[in-house]
Image (spheres, rainbow, N blue to C red):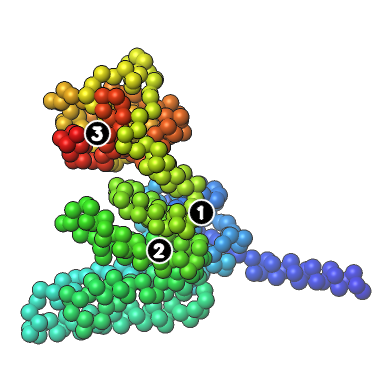
Amino acid sequence: MKFLFSILFLLVLLISNIIFAQEIKIEIIGAKDKAALFEIEGEKANIIDSVFSQDNIFRFSLKDQSAGFYRLQLDNNHKITFINDGKSVILKTDYDNLFDSLHVIKSESNKLYFKFVKLNKSYKTKTYLLNIILRYYPNDDEYYSITREKLKAIQNVYSLFINKTSQKEPNSFIARYIKSTQLPIINITIPIKEQLAFLKKHSLDNVDFNDAELIFSDVFVNKAIEYLSYYKNKQLPKKVLEKEFTKAVDTLLNKAKVNELVYQHITEYLIDGFKKFGFDNVIDYIVKNYVIKDDLCLDEQTENSIQNRIDQAKLLTIGTLAPNLIMPDKNGKVFDLSKIKSDKTLLVFYVSWCPHCKKLLPQLVKWYKNKNNIKIIAISLDSNNKDWLKFIKDNNLDFINIKAPNGWDGDLTAKYFIYATPTMFLLDRNKKIIGKPNTLKELKYFMDSL
């Protein structure tokens, strides 16, 4: 009897597992037979598997994976981001029109998600255009009142979706995601001139910085970008703009401190983002006031970059003798930095694919043509010789061109604590560091003043 009971119990358990097993089925008409599966973490996409299709259908399960955003990527231009909440997901779409032809057959979370994406885009566009009208249209005209009512109606529809339609299961991942990532709604009674101040003060009110599970989405990245945009002004000089960005950084990171993982996640994103746009002073501010002060544990790549930044600032100070360089140049001749006879020497570390390098190096070529008191040593960190030589040829780099052995992972990069490109060191006749310019403008200043 006990044996029969055990068999029945196992059968029930097996049937239950089959019935409630998660099924993810994504049908893409016209798709290739292989795709990569990624887990999303802010701007990072971490590959977790390869998926093969059968009759245009990709099947897999994410039952043991964390809740959050995942991406099925067919190639660089064809990818579908969807939500995994542990339940089954069935999607159908067309390879040539992935988003607009997408149909969610099963998954309430994904139905809400894709509806929210469309609504968010529509809301952002319409409110932007209506606010332009309200800003410039005479407020005593009838059309002004009509526009205000239209704006209010659009806000009401958006608010209804955010606060009611999407919140039937308030503890679900999608409900929490929508609640935190929603766009700010500005009361139409607030004067246009006061709206920016309102956004700076209140646009992060609905973001749950204590929800670490939202790291596996684009919430914190999107809200950081949105919040920083309120402090952006292209007409401001770079140094003034950097000071404005530090105000935004203070607000974001102090709110994020409620959760260590979220704090780390946003800090890493801000450092990487400001690095891409060359805002070194903002990065230094984050390092000094948050990373070092709170002993933040960042990911290895960011950690190494920060440590190199700190070491470069401490160990390669103005007046320090630059580490010597001895290696072959592009013609195979041995280059020895200590043997260079010139009033000044400029070391430029770069990689051929770096956007800022592509901008700076041609500027240096033009500036260098009529200079007799300086030698420029262009040091490539490229891993591929063909890319390096092509970049030299395409940009007519009339410098002493050398390539660091092993690129980013070599001893030369370590000697100079290179954490970003381009990086420049201006040396005097004795090869002592007299300046570390970030731009051609700063280089000109050092050349004229030293």
Q: Quadrant of residue 234?
A: bottom left
Question: Quick check: marks 3 and 1 in contact, CB under 8 Å?
Answer: no
> What residue sits 17% from the left and 36% below the top?
449
User: Which quadrant, please, contains the C terminus?
Assistant: top left
Mark 1 secondary-structure assignment: loop
Position of residue 142 measured from the top left corner of the image (x, y, whole percent): 9, 85
Nearer to me, 322 or 378: 322
Residue indicated by mark 3: 361
Q: Which is nearer the N-term, disc 3 or disc 1?
A: 1
Kind of residue sitting beneath label 3? Leu
Q: How far is the residue under mark 1 from the one under mark 2?
A: 15 Å
Mark linked to residue 426? none
> Which residue is identified by label 2?
253
Q: Earlier in the sequence, mark 3 or mark 2?
A: 2
- Residue 117 x %, y %: 37, 67
Decide: is 363 above or below 396.
below
In the rendered image, which quarter contains the N terminus?
bottom right
Amino acid residing under circle 2: Leu
Q: Is residue 95 above or below residue 155?
A: above
> Mark 3 near mark 2, Cβ–Cβ under 8 Å?
no
Q: Residue at x 52, y 76 (%)?
A: 171
